[in-house]
Amino acid sequence: MTTLKEKNQQHLFTITTELDPPKSASSASTEADVVKVAPYVDAVNIADCPTARLRMSPIALSSIIQSKYNVESIFHLTCRDRNVIGLQAELLGAYALGVRNILTLTGDPPTLGDHPEAKGVFEVDSTGLIEIARSLNEGHDLTGHELGQPTDFYIGTTAGVGEDIEKEVRRLEGKKKAGAQFVQTQPIYDLSQAEEFLKAAKGLDLPILFGIVPLKSYKMANYLNTKVPGIYIPPQVMKAMEDGGRETGIALSRELVQGLMEMGAAGAHLMPVKDVDAVPLIVKGLR
């Protein structure tokens, strides 16, 4: 199987999607979602207790998915719940389980989640976590002590594209220096925004997979446009969603993916928000 890393290195357009792990000791519900999307994507992201809410370990779930469904996983790892010893231990365990792709995140504070009294660690931020992963790839721990065997993680990071692009590109420069190897962005709904970001980030030579959240209603579009920082939905898209619904959102998402392919982006990252059935509908006919 050609890996996500190899596809990015070969400049093949890649599609990833994001799934939440269950609040359960059973992985059955997420596995059912994987069955629906696996034929259509190159990798599946598994979140790490998203919005600071208790969920199954993304590393364990990623290992299950890869072993049973022949699709790569990208496990999220946040700095919220572990100090640098714990982060390194998690990474070594992940590698031993065959999970090679990581998305490094600082993480949401516990006060947002279902255990608001929990203590956040945040000993390092996402850039510090990138440095940890790079150190393990180089064959030593964070303090320079040699490992018995090095890792070979494909290290991902995130980026916003909707606000100060020059500032965001400078942040990515620092993350690349720390060891980042690919990027998944916040949602876009305007191809000119993606084109501008690609132009600004060209010198970084990092594969950039642009995020897309398929819209289900005008209410959803309006909420994202007015309440979520960094997301801009053009008036023509808002108008289309005002007149349409989920089918319109799926069609618009397909147009975005097609446009990203045509402009030479590295890929698209679909975030279906509890509507995994939308992923095949978006991708069919494009691949």
Image: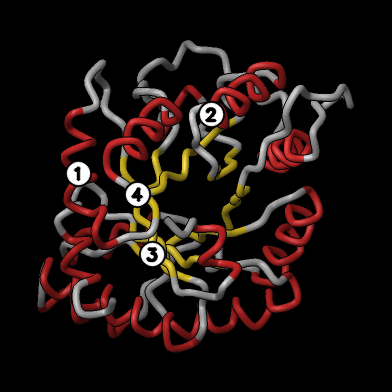
Residue 15 is labelled as 3
Left or right, 107 with reference to 286: right
Of the pair 56 and 34, the residue shown nearer to us: 34
**Mark nearer the N terminus (2 vs 1):** 1
Residue 71 is labelled as 4
Between circles 4 and 3, the one closer to the viewer is 4
**Residue 241 screen position, x and y as percent:** 18, 74
**Residue situated furthest bottom in the rendering:** 262
Residue at image position (36%, 65%) is 212
- Kind of residue sitting beneath label 3: Ile
The reply to whether the C-beta atoms of the residues labelled 2 and 3 are less than 8 Å apart is no
The reply to whether the C-beta atoms of the residues labelled 2 and 4 are less than 8 Å apart is no
Occupied quadrant, residue 56:
top left
Between circles 4 and 1, the one closer to the viewer is 4
- Kind of residue sitting beneath label 4: Val
**Residue 249 screen position, x and y as percent:** 20, 71
How far is the residue under mark 2 from the one under mark 1? 22 Å
